[in-house]
Amino acid sequence: MTESGPKEFDDLEPLHELTELEPLPELDHLEELEPLVELEPVMEKPEPAPVPPKPEVTPPPAPTPPAPKPEVAPPAPKPEVAPPASQSAPSAAPAVAAAAATAAVASDDSSDDGKARKTQEERDREKAERAAAKKAELDARLGKIDGKRELEAAPIMLRKAAMILLGASLLPFGAKVTAAAFVGKLILLCAAYVFHQGHVFKAGEKAPGFIASLAKNNLMPVLALAGAIAIAGFVVPNFIGEYPISSMGEMAALALACFTFTHIFDYEHGGKFNPIYPLLFLGPAIMGLLGILKLSEAEGLTMVAAALGSLGVAIAGFMAVYTMFVAIKQAKIEGDLKKQAAAEARKAAREARRK
């Protein structure tokens, strides 16, 4: 079914037929073009090759200095020959001048050697003076006088207690007196002597030759020797005869007295005070009291020796224990003085800032 009305493209002009189109002009009517001119090829310039860096010129080695020529000793001055009587005095002047110059050179050389030796001696002396000054400063900090510290009341009292205990423990403060215990005490005294002399050498004082040779590099060999002798003092009496337990207590008190005396010696020469020693004296104090209670078992001279020994050991023990209270009191006083000094220093600093 078709529509009869006008269509959308009816108003367009009809296309021309191919025969109605105008013919195209022929190519021969066109103007001839100029022939192409061939251009010469442009030669590219070659890139220049990179120039290698110039090698660094090493400076010639410095010439080695020639070896010093050995110094030739100045010739010995020739003996002056007296000029004849006919020769005039001015002719002898050059010989005298040469001899004087030779003597001056020799004196200069000897003075240079003496100056070098003197310089070395001065260095050694200055080194010794610096060491002495450093030691004096350390001694002043520790409160030492002539290399020794000024002892306080507690160490002095403890040393006295050790000396009393040493004398009392040599006596038999037990009920029995045996030769084995006496031999053991002698051996123990030898051990205490070696121990003390080792500390004497350590403090810089004179000691026996064999102790000095053992403690030359280290004090440990001396301590080992003293320990071995002390052990022998406790063991050997068992093979000699009767060796009661009370005798072992006497030897223990003797060892404590000797070691405490050496400890105070160390403290006097710059060591530290160990408060364990006064506490150890509680043992001798108790043994002395027990010995006094057992005096009824002894007879004659044995009873007198036991009485003196027991009484001395008890006094030494309680005396050493009392040093603990003295040391605590002294430490409290020193602490208060330090606090007072610190407070005064702070007060002075505040006043200085206000000004």
Image: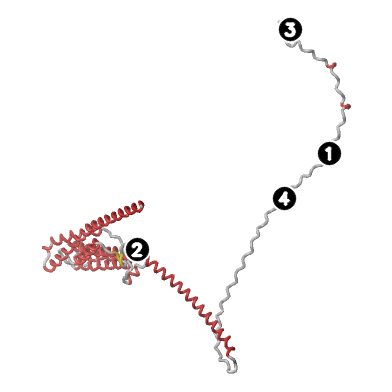
Residue 320: image quadrant is bottom left
Q: Dot 1 surroundings within 10 Å: few (below 14), some, or many (20 or more)?
A: few
Inter-mark Cα distance, 1 to 2: 109 Å
Q: Which residue is mark 2?
A: 138
Q: Residue furthest front?
A: 355
Query: Looking at the rendered structure, which numbered label has been put on residue 198?
Result: none
Name the residue nearer the viewer: 333 or 20.
333
First of labels 1, 2 by sequence position: 1
Question: Where in the figure is residue 262, as x and y percent of width and height?
Answer: 27, 65
First of labels 2, 3 by sequence position: 3
First of labels 1, 3 by sequence position: 3
From where the camera sits, is residue 44 visible?
Answer: yes
Give the structural element (helix, strand or loop) at label 2. Answer: helix
Give the structural element (helix, strand or loop) at label 4. Answer: loop
Q: Which residue is mark 1?
A: 38
Q: Dot 4 surroundings within 10 Å: few (below 14), some, or many (20 or more)?
A: few
The reply to whether dot 4 and dot 1 touch (C-beta < 8 Å) is: no
Q: Which residue is mark 3?
A: 6
Q: Where, quadrant-wise, is the N terminus in this rendering? A: top right
- Residue type marked 4: Ala
